[in-house]
Amino acid sequence: MDTLPSLTRDLVAIPSHDAEAAAGEHITAWLRDHTDARVTRDDHGNVIARKGEGEESLALVGHHDVVPPDGSQLDADGEYVVEERDGRLYGRGTADMKGCVAAAMLAFRDADPAGELVFASFVGEEQGGVGCQAAIEDGFAPEYAVVGEGSTGYSAPGTTDVAVAHKGRRGSTLIAEGAAAHASEPGAGANAIYRATDAVDVVRELDFPETTVLGHELSGSVAVTEIDGGSAWNVIPERCEVTVDERTVPDERAPLDRAEAIDGVSWRVDQDLPPMACGDADFADAVLDAATAAQDSTPEQVVKPHATDAGWLAQAGTDCVVVGAAEPGEAHTADESVSLAVLERCREVYEGVAEAWPSR
């Protein structure tokens, strides 16, 4: 029978940064071999399994795509390197988030659920959640979800907390257009860089969005991160673009459209990853109870700075929390790793929640 370390190793060893099919096929085959669940792999590559019955459903949610590996994470044949050292598993995808996909698979297999229990592993999370969005469009709509992204180390080192909210990310571009002229006669043109800097001044004066989720404060941010304009040292620029990174909070957005009051400036949204806020305090408390029972330290309900697929689910009406083994700074690094003991803790949390919620 597969152990959590062995199942995690198997998943991490399957390359899934360019194509996710092999990882999805492995998860699908494992679920069919080890459970009596109704297992599907949809046209997008998402793997979804269901067991148990009830008016309300709880989903254990992850994703099996990863970001491209660092060269040190590949062997001479270009295969993923997976190593175990000092109680940790090293390799691309260990922390983000095949370790918790494996933990959710085992919890799904072993749990005697209180209602309908759903396992879902999506594709394309690292591309903005395209797999999750596609599943939602196809009707994926659990009432509750535990998303296995990282929540360890927020309240205290090594403690696996319960994130009841996270920020979203809206990336946008301010486009300033003017009229070119020779730099020796600046009045003959309209300087797009000047217009762009006026728009930057508008952004600098904006208040950061803020909200409260289950008594926890969540603050966003707005920052200009890139500026690109001009064609030559002696030409008045006719175009300049400014990149704005905004970390959003539920039901709040910075009024970036104010920059369009500057002559020649328009605003374009390039990406909008939604934030997440759990709206059911009883569910959040039930997950916290399961997290408390699974560890000696005292976990807390926290807020998370990074967008996840929980944002898309929450936007569609699912009450979500985030519970996972990854600690801040572990994902997407050349030395990415995950604690095997914390993975086992997460498996216990997932199984405990599945057997307690929805409450009987």
Image (cartoon, rainbow, N blue to C red):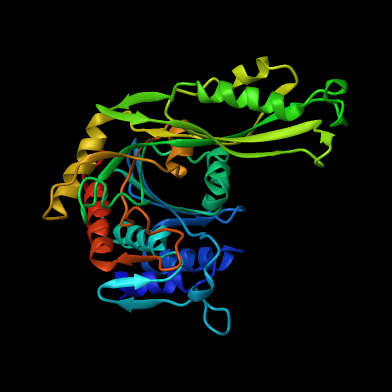
Q: How far from the left and from the top, in percent, is residue 56?
A: 34, 36
Along the horizontal axis of the image, is 105 left or right of 234?
left
Residue pushed farthest left?
A: 296
x then y, percent, for residue 70:
52, 69
**Residue 187: x percent and y percent?**
84, 20
Q: Is residue 135 above or below residue 239?
A: below
As drawn, the residue found furthest toward the bottom would be 76
Residue at 46% in and 44% down:
309
* Residue 316 visible to the viewer: no
- Is 196 on the left or on the right of 316, as rendered? right
Q: Is residue 243 left or right of residue 194?
A: left
Q: Quadrant of the N terminus?
A: bottom left
Q: Residue at x 15, y 55 (%)?
A: 295
Quadrant of the image containing the C terminus: top left
Residue 255 shows in the view: yes
Q: Vertical placement of 96 versus 88: above or below?
A: above
Which residue is located at x 45 percent, y 42 percent? 307
Q: Is residue 67 left or right of residue 326?
A: right
